[in-house]
Amino acid sequence: MVPWSLETFWERIAPTFIENWPQALRERSLPALDLQVPWDELLAAMSHSKYRGWFPNLQPHLSLDALEERIDAGLAQIGGPAFLRLGSRSPKDGLQAQQFGLRIEHGHQGVRLLTSDSRRAAFDIRCAMDYSTMPRLFLRPWRTIPTWSEFRCFIQGGEVVGISQYDFRDLGRSEIIVQHAERIEAVLREALAAMLPEFHLPDIIADLILVPNEDDRKEITKDAVTNNRFDAMLLELNPFIVQTNPALFTWLEPFDRRFRFIH
């Protein structure tokens, strides 16, 4: 079950989890509420998953009441709908997420995200067991992120070696990116330049989103880009390893420092 060496996990993967970000990077990203979920509640969720067999001696269908109450309390603290994710990544591959999305308003919806056979969630929780670390569960205030507004940025040796349109398979060619590529690239590079001294790994992959510069809590619009009223914000970090999707780059060739998007 252990997919990486202990050294690789601690030096290259675990530092990208939200709970391990430096405070300066957290302040450049969306708010994230740590739910402080104990092991028994996480394992209760896994007891309802088809991946229960990954967890030795775990009885099936344990009570989910405590986990649901914890998520409800977190939602009340946030004061509205939220996005639930592990510190490592989201359970976006599970049946609940595929059918109903990742937006939750009630604790039972969050529980369903974890119990509806997300391999990503089960895998990361099991890896935490293997490496004797505590997985963390976060709520972020919900925001709609248009697919055209997210970009994958590659940092190697402390330098930006490439920027790519994130969603290239489903989105394809985006007119707003094509028309404003030069300004979008400039905004992304300016944001990355500010973040470079704060990255705690020399090699890392950062996903950035475009946000309105008058209020970064709001959803970006195409009008904001057209009128040059936008900035960029950190969304998440990923390990600089071949298991991470290289977007419009490839792991078979060196990164060429370009901004890549579908023309």
Image (spheres, grey):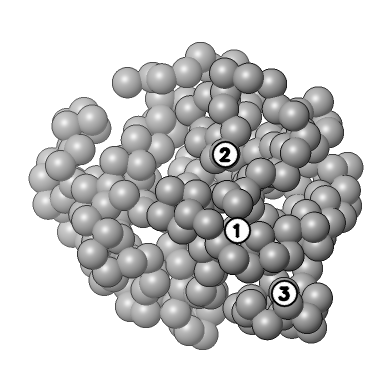
What residue lies at 15% left-to-right and 42% top-to-bottom?
50
State the SS at label 3. Answer: helix
Outermost residue to the front: 263
What residue lies at 56% left-to-right and 62% top-to-bottom?
174
Q: Position of residue 88 (x, y in %)?
A: 50, 44
Q: In the rendered structure, which disc, 1 or 2, sits on the residue that comes first in sequence? A: 1
Q: Is residue 181 above or below residue 152?
A: below
Taking the image as shown, residue 217 lies to the left or right of residue 75, namely right
Q: Residues within 10 Å of mark 2 (few under 14, many from 20)?
A: some
Outermost residue to the left: 60
Marks 1 and 3, how far apart at CA: 13 Å
- Say which of 173 and 18 sits in front: 173
What residue lies at 41% left-to-right and 30% top-to-bottom?
127
- Say which of 235 and 13 sits in front: 235
State the SS at label 1. Answer: strand
Q: Position of residue 258 (x, y in %)?
A: 75, 39
Residue type at mark 1: give it: Glu
Quadrant hosting residue 161: top right
Q: Residue at label 2?
A: 248
Q: Residue at label 3?
A: 225
Marks 1 and 2, how far apart at CA: 13 Å
Q: Residues within 10 Å of mark 3 (few under 14, many from 20)?
A: many
Taking the image as shown, residue 155 lies to the left or right of residue 58, namely right
Q: Residue at label 1?
A: 150
What residue lies at 16% left-to-right and 50% top-to-bottom?
48
Q: In the rendered structure, which disc, 3 or 2, sits on the residue that comes first in sequence? A: 3
Residue type at mark 3: give it: Val
Q: Is residue 55 above or below residue 251?
A: below
Q: Position of residue 192 (x, y in %)?
A: 81, 49
